[in-house]
Image: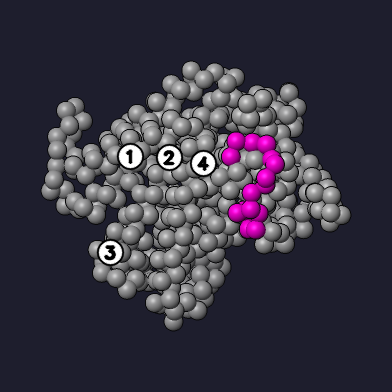
Amino acid sequence: METLTAVLERIDSLVWGIPLMVLILAGGILLTARMKVLQLRKLPLALKWMIKNEEDGEGEVTSFGALCTALSATIGTGNIVGVATAVCAGGPGALFWMIVAAFFGMATKYAEGLLAIKYRVVDENGHSLGGPFYYIERGMGKQWKWLAKLFAIFGVLVGLLGIGTITQVNGIANAVRGFFDPDNTHMVSIPYIGDYSIFVVGASIVVAIFVALVLIGGIKRISSVAQVIVPFMAIAYVAFCLILIACNIRSVPGSFVIIVQGAFNPRAVTGGVVGTMFVAMQKGVSRGIFSNEAGLGSAPIAAAAAQTKEPVRQGLVSMTGTFIDTIVICTMTGLAIVMTGAWQVEGLEGVQVTNYAFANGLPFPEQISSGVLMLCLAFFAFTTILGWDYYSERCLEYLVGGQTKAITIYRWVYIFVVFIGPYLTVSAVWTIADIVNGLMAIPNMIAIFALNGVVVKETKDFFTRMKQGHL
């Protein structure tokens, strides 16, 4: 088992290594150059359209609902735990490179949203299906259908192997246990499984029930729940981060200096603990990509369900997801960690780092600060479970030709995995899920490079029509 784990970890490091990061960044840089920094020029318009839905577009959910569905999967424990891991491993400079990756990732996410609408399929009942599998097949040609199926297979495996189930429900259960039963004093014995805190058992039951209630209703219910929870949890989390920053306002200028200096000369900031600029860049870029999923091809699956007639409009709305996820939320987390010095405290890792920042930076008792972080983690992880179910179901739907029986069976299997998730701690399963998640990006980025001319043409045509008042 140790040999298998070592092999999988080696494959994981290769998949999420330099080639994949270069591939995704290169796509974002190419699109940024060809569209003349559209993500910066059109960001105000994108934010306006983010909350202003198109009235007569075809699709299953509003553009805002599609965005919230995509954000439900991207805004997860990585925004709290992942940022802390990146800053501790790569130094404060990792945050700088995370933002850089997100900036170019906005162009990639724009292209994904645009292509998702342009090449989607909408049947007579208004059911929409689209994403990388369709813009590969219909955009690149039937001869590339094998690549589209490869993407869909990876997408189903990600759902089945737990990137949206096991890891997320584990995060919820551990957060609840850490808050209510940190010393494991309230234990129950589960036959053939082992001894667990009663709060872990309770969390698995409650989460599975709520997930089932939402998923049985399909995309419309997932979208309606996401439209309530995602804005609420994002605003609440950012609000507490802003309170923390306001209470430590004198540390802000120095923290920015540390972040920028650490991006180019980490050893000057960390005292030689972290290493080179390359390490800071690698940790920041990889965490940025993993957090906002720009280039992975997951978000356009949700974008394809949006009620819109204009691919460019949905591309702009999709683009705001990367802005919100990384440039706003991840930056807030990273700044809180740097300002409070949490990244320098020995013995802390993962969520403990962010918890330290909240406990020592907020003007509230430690119990309240820890409670706030626990709730944020729970909501973030819960919505990620919902979002990834939708992604993997649509991938399966493409593979089986829309057979509803197969999709229904898969949905119930997914709910069952959520229920047993807290009791599955096999690291090999998580590593495999991580690998197939990264592999999704390869077919998707091939399509982005192949169809970048289509993206540029659609963009020019749209803004020409808009300027002439023909929209």
Residue 223 locus on image (x, y percent): 51, 41
Q: Which residue lies furthest to the bottom in this view?
A: 250
Look at the image and give the residue range highlighted in magenta.
47-61
Rounded to the nearest whole Å, what is the CA distance between mark 3 and mark 2? 26 Å
Q: Is 116 left or right of 357, judged from the image as shown?
A: right
Q: Which of 338 and 19 is in front in this view?
A: 338
Q: Does residue 151 sit above or below 39 in this rendering?
A: above
Residue 249 part of the magenta segment: no
Q: Is mark 2 on a helix, strand or loop?
A: helix
Q: Nearer the viewer, residue 243 or 191?
A: 243
Q: Residue 207 carries which label?
A: 1
Give, as a three-letter code, the residue at label 4. Ser
**Identity of the residue drawn at 56% across and 68% down:** 264
Q: Are marks 2 and 1 in contact (CB under 8 Å)?
A: yes
**Disc with the residue nearer the chain's start (2 vs 1):** 1
Residue 288 locus on image (x, y percent): 53, 54
**Disc with the residue nearer the chain's start (4 vs 2):** 4
Around disc 4, counting alpha carbons within 10 Å, would you say few (fewer than 14), some (14 to 19), or many (20 or more)? many
Rounded to the nearest whole Å, what is the CA distance between mark 4 and mark 2? 13 Å
Q: Nearer the viewer, residue 175 or 242?
A: 242
Colour scheme of the rendered structure: one colour
Q: Residue 455 carries which label?
A: none
Q: Are marks 1 and 4 in contact (CB under 8 Å)?
A: no
**Identity of the residue drawn at 60% across and 43% down:** 62
Rounded to the nearest whole Å, what is the CA distance between mark 1 and mark 3? 23 Å
Which residue is disc 4 drawn over?
Answer: 223
Q: Do the residues labelled 1 and 3 touch (CB within 8 Å)?
A: no
Which residue is disc 3 drawn over?
Answer: 368
Residue 19 locus on image (x, y percent): 60, 45
**Residue 283 seen in the figure:** no
Residue 49 part of the magenta segment: yes
Q: Please identify, in this view, whether the residue under mark 4 or under mark 2 is nearer the observer.
A: 4
